[in-house]
Image (cartoon, rainbow, N blue to C red):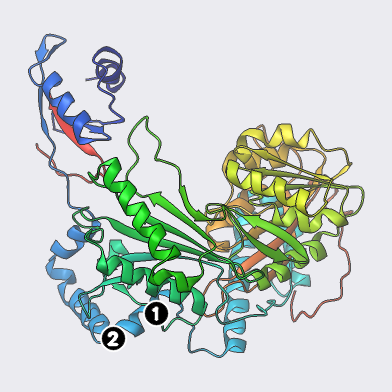
Amino acid sequence: MEESELKKLLNDKLKLGSNKVKPPAKGSYWVYVCFRSEEDRQNALRALDGFVWKNKTLSAEIAKPAPDPLVKKRRQESHEKRDVEDAKKQKIDDKSQEERLKASTIPFWDVPYDKQIEQKQANIRQILVKMGHDMVKGNPALKPWVDKQRSKYNGLPCELWDVRASPVCDGYRNKCEFTVGINEETGERTVGFRLGSYVQGFTGVGPVDCLRHIPDRMKEAAKTFEKFVQASDLGVFNPETHEGYWRQLMVRLSTGSGQLMLVVGMHPQTLSQEELRKVKDDLKDFFENGEGKTCNVASLYFQHIMRRQAGKELPPLEHLMGKTHIYETLLGLKFRVSPEAFFQINTSAAEVLYNSVAELSCPTENTTVIDICCGTGSIGLCLAKKCGQVLGVELLAQAVDDAKSNAKDNDITNCDFFVGRAEDILSSVMNRAVKGDILAVVDPPRAGLHHRALIHLRRAEKLSKLVFLSCDPKAAAKNFVDLSRPTSKTYHGAPLVPVRAVPVDMFPHTSHCELIVYLERVDLNQLGKTQPEQRSFYHNSSEGSTKHHTSSEEEIQLQC
């Protein structure tokens, strides 16, 4: 059975709207077909069972999916691992709920801050050592240059400055996403954090009172909403059975204005529009006139959180009360922040971060800054007075609206922002540069920048400098290797290689640390004659059959 022909039958001829076809395993005659909803699956069963195709009669039935990761883990009883798993479980069970919660969210909570900084410096050093090794592996012609860098910087491929500490270590988060679930110790509905990851078998939720990185006002908001959930006739969402309603509370808190934004997330299940309207009215009344009034909520939103069906978009966030945005202050600039827009979660450390970007890259009036993954435009706007032009690229339209509004509110006229995926619009945005010296600043999601966007960066002949911000340098390591690959049909232009790096501790009491890497082009043909420009800075640095299978969708299996 040809997979492409089957897809044409399912979607073009029978109009069944399947979204995935899994070919049969070796020795099996069954094909698995996935659908986004139970209704679509039932329609397919009726249409396909007994249908004659290519002189063969098809048999269709509901597939037997494997249990989800949680159920699978709980049923795993292999003899080889049983003793180990039991020992681990006993170790976890011996810890209090508070200890488990701290271990999963702020594992460095009891480590002196200077020791945290030392550990993060050591971790970043190890990442850079591996980066140098991987760069040479991906581009052997770089070895002479990397060897020279290693001799200058104590084994590292670039200069490494000391970790820059966060000015605020406790209560620094300006955004948190709290889970609504069941407290394993009390059995009560709780708004807090999960005690471990779902795939590891954890569904219990613990209160956040003991977590020192969360501001008191956020804790109060979570506790207050918890009372609303406990009094509700609607139950909390169960990730095992997918039953229940209340799922999440997202909280944003402006450290500058003190404004509090709440986004309440729930699964509507089969609630009617009238019943949903009552839920929203109750929420609004609770925070406007009821016990929630003490939270002084500046902005309240409602969000549907459920699986998206094929061809259908989830309803947008619905504004229920107060202002549509809150405002944050950063390096003397005022920023409008919408519910879903990205903004650095540690405002005071973000000022250190952005000052470090400017210090590393030294933009001038002849520089065009391309701010990739710009969010609300915070990096570009903070650099605007130091450069000639800023062009921002961002996927989320709402964030681009914020960025444009922020530029206007701060009387910044040399900035423009564009909606789209970086890999799709980067080339056209770069063509708008009116200044000859192009500096790209990349602040991508945790996993790094899309491969096609990296290729466009390499192809931009005018681009000679790049600043890469990473909140997870290990995850983004492949990006650095790809930027340094040899010139080819895919990778045009000279390689971009790391020259300097500085870690900034955006996340005290956790193992995470932001890393800024400044890269420049290196001409391998001139390797023995010149090096990428090295500027001098003053800084404090010490270095340089019916088969079971896994699926999250509705499925049937076909046999012919």
For label 2, the residue is 95
> Does residue 399 appear in the picture of this structure?
yes
Q: Position of residue 341 (x, y in %)?
A: 57, 52
How far apart marks 1 and 2 lie (CA) works out to 10 Å
Q: Residue at x 16, y 70 (%)?
A: 80
Q: Are marks 1 and 2 in contact (CB under 8 Å)?
A: yes
User: Disc 1 or 2, which lies upstream in sequence?
Assistant: 2
Q: Residue at x 83, y 51 (%)?
A: 411
Q: Position of residue 390 (x, y in %)?
A: 79, 46
Residue 190 is left or right of residue 417, and the answer is left
> Does residue 510 appear in the picture of this structure?
no
Considering every residue shown, the one lying at the far front of the view is 289
Q: Residue at x 92, y 47 (%)?
A: 366
Image quarter of the N terminus:
top left
Considering every residue shown, the one lying at the far right of the view is 365
Amino acid type, label 2: Lys
For label 1, the residue is 103
Amino acid type, label 1: Ala
